[in-house]
Amino acid sequence: MSDKVYNNSNQNERGGFMEVGKKLRGLREDKKMSMYRLTQLTGVSGHHIKGIEEGTRQPTIETLSRLAVALGSSLAELFNDNMECTYLSHNERLLIENFRRLSDEKADALLKMSDVLNK
Protein backbone atom coordinates (compact mmCIF):
# COMPACT_ATOMS: atom_id res chain seq x y z
CA MET A 1 0.00 0.00 0.00
CA SER A 2 1.50 3.36 -0.97
CA ASP A 3 1.03 6.76 0.57
CA LYS A 4 -1.47 9.05 -1.15
CA VAL A 5 -1.18 12.68 -2.13
CA TYR A 6 -4.12 15.03 -1.62
CA ASN A 7 -4.54 18.45 -3.10
CA ASN A 8 -5.68 21.43 -1.01
CA SER A 9 -9.37 20.77 -1.72
CA ASN A 10 -9.11 17.44 0.11
CA GLN A 11 -7.44 18.87 3.20
CA ASN A 12 -10.72 19.70 4.91
CA GLU A 13 -12.09 16.25 4.17
CA ARG A 14 -8.85 14.69 5.44
CA GLY A 15 -8.53 16.88 8.55
CA GLY A 16 -7.31 13.93 10.60
CA PHE A 17 -4.20 13.69 8.48
CA MET A 18 -3.55 17.40 8.93
CA GLU A 19 -3.78 16.99 12.72
CA VAL A 20 -1.37 14.04 12.69
CA GLY A 21 0.99 16.09 10.53
CA LYS A 22 0.81 19.00 12.96
CA LYS A 23 1.58 16.66 15.84
CA LEU A 24 4.53 15.17 13.98
CA ARG A 25 5.90 18.63 13.26
CA GLY A 26 5.40 19.65 16.88
CA LEU A 27 7.20 16.56 18.16
CA ARG A 28 10.06 17.11 15.72
CA GLU A 29 10.41 20.76 16.67
CA ASP A 30 10.16 19.99 20.40
CA LYS A 31 13.07 17.58 19.97
CA LYS A 32 14.91 20.23 17.93
CA MET A 33 15.29 17.63 15.19
CA SER A 34 15.77 18.73 11.62
CA MET A 35 13.78 17.16 8.85
CA TYR A 36 17.09 15.93 7.43
CA ARG A 37 17.88 14.08 10.69
CA LEU A 38 14.40 12.53 10.75
CA THR A 39 14.99 11.40 7.17
CA GLN A 40 18.26 9.76 8.21
CA LEU A 41 16.62 7.94 11.12
CA THR A 42 13.57 6.70 9.22
CA GLY A 43 14.46 6.40 5.56
CA VAL A 44 11.41 8.55 4.72
CA SER A 45 12.25 11.35 2.28
CA GLY A 46 12.25 14.95 3.46
CA HIS A 47 9.76 15.84 0.72
CA HIS A 48 7.42 13.14 1.97
CA ILE A 49 7.77 14.20 5.62
CA LYS A 50 7.03 17.80 4.63
CA GLY A 51 3.88 16.66 2.82
CA ILE A 52 2.75 14.67 5.86
CA GLU A 53 3.39 17.62 8.18
CA GLU A 54 1.45 19.94 5.85
CA GLY A 55 -1.43 17.50 5.52
CA THR A 56 -1.04 17.05 1.76
CA ARG A 57 0.05 13.40 2.01
CA GLN A 58 -1.74 10.50 3.61
CA PRO A 59 0.94 8.28 5.14
CA THR A 60 0.65 4.56 5.71
CA ILE A 61 0.57 3.25 9.26
CA GLU A 62 4.07 1.82 8.67
CA THR A 63 5.40 5.26 7.72
CA LEU A 64 3.72 6.92 10.70
CA SER A 65 5.09 4.25 13.01
CA ARG A 66 8.66 4.78 11.76
CA LEU A 67 8.32 8.54 12.23
CA ALA A 68 6.74 8.23 15.68
CA VAL A 69 9.40 5.83 16.96
CA ALA A 70 12.21 8.08 15.69
CA LEU A 71 10.57 10.97 17.57
CA GLY A 72 10.23 8.97 20.79
CA SER A 73 6.46 8.74 20.47
CA SER A 74 3.81 6.19 19.56
CA LEU A 75 0.97 5.83 17.09
CA ALA A 76 -1.47 6.08 20.01
CA GLU A 77 -0.08 9.47 20.94
CA LEU A 78 -0.27 10.71 17.34
CA PHE A 79 -3.93 9.79 17.05
CA ASN A 80 -4.92 11.04 20.51
CA ASP A 81 -7.25 14.02 20.05
CA ASN A 82 -5.86 15.98 22.97
CA MET A 83 -2.22 16.98 23.17
CA GLU A 84 -1.49 14.99 26.33
CA CYS A 85 1.07 12.23 26.21
CA THR A 86 -0.65 8.84 26.32
CA TYR A 87 2.47 6.71 26.17
CA LEU A 88 5.47 6.83 28.45
CA SER A 89 8.75 5.06 27.93
CA HIS A 90 10.19 2.93 30.71
CA ASN A 91 12.56 5.73 31.76
CA GLU A 92 9.75 8.30 31.78
CA ARG A 93 7.65 6.06 34.04
CA LEU A 94 10.60 5.60 36.41
CA LEU A 95 11.19 9.33 36.50
CA ILE A 96 7.56 10.01 37.39
CA GLU A 97 7.49 7.26 40.03
CA ASN A 98 10.66 8.61 41.64
CA PHE A 99 9.41 12.19 41.47
CA ARG A 100 6.20 11.27 43.30
CA ARG A 101 8.26 9.88 46.20
CA LEU A 102 10.27 13.08 46.68
CA SER A 103 9.64 15.62 49.41
CA ASP A 104 8.23 18.96 48.22
CA GLU A 105 11.64 20.57 48.69
CA LYS A 106 13.46 17.95 46.62
CA ALA A 107 10.73 17.99 43.96
CA ASP A 108 11.15 21.76 43.60
CA ALA A 109 14.94 21.37 43.32
CA LEU A 110 14.53 18.69 40.64
CA LEU A 111 12.13 20.89 38.65
CA LYS A 112 14.61 23.78 38.77
CA MET A 113 17.40 21.48 37.60
CA SER A 114 15.17 20.21 34.80
CA ASP A 115 14.51 23.78 33.67
CA VAL A 116 18.25 24.47 33.55
CA LEU A 117 18.91 21.28 31.54
CA ASN A 118 16.22 22.19 28.99
CA LYS A 119 17.74 25.60 28.17
Image (cartoon, helix red, strand yellow):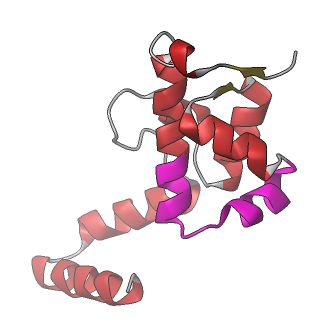
- Taking depth in this image into account, of 37 and 10 the one nearest to the observer is 10
For residue 64: magenta? no
From the image, give the main secondary structure of the stretch colored magenta. Answer: helix
- Taking depth in this image into account, of 64 and 44 the one nearest to the observer is 44
| Vertical side of 70 occupied by 10: above or below | above
- In this view, which residue lies farthest toward the top? 13
> Which residue corresponds to the image point at 79% horizontal and 23% vertical from the top-left?
3
Number of numbered discs visible in the structure rendering:
0
| Vertical side of 77 occupied by 100: above or below | below
Q: Which residues are magenta?
A: 25-43
- In this view, which residue lies farthest toward the left? 104
Which image quadrant is residue 115 in? bottom left
Q: Position of residue 7 (x, y in %)?
A: 62, 20
Q: Position of residue 31 (x, y in %)?
A: 53, 66
> Which residue corresponds to the image point at 87% horizontal and 50% vertical from the top-left?
43
> Which residue corresponds to the image point at 16% horizontal and 77% vertical from the top-left?
103
> Which residue corresponds to the image point at 47% horizontal and 40% vertical from the top-left?
22
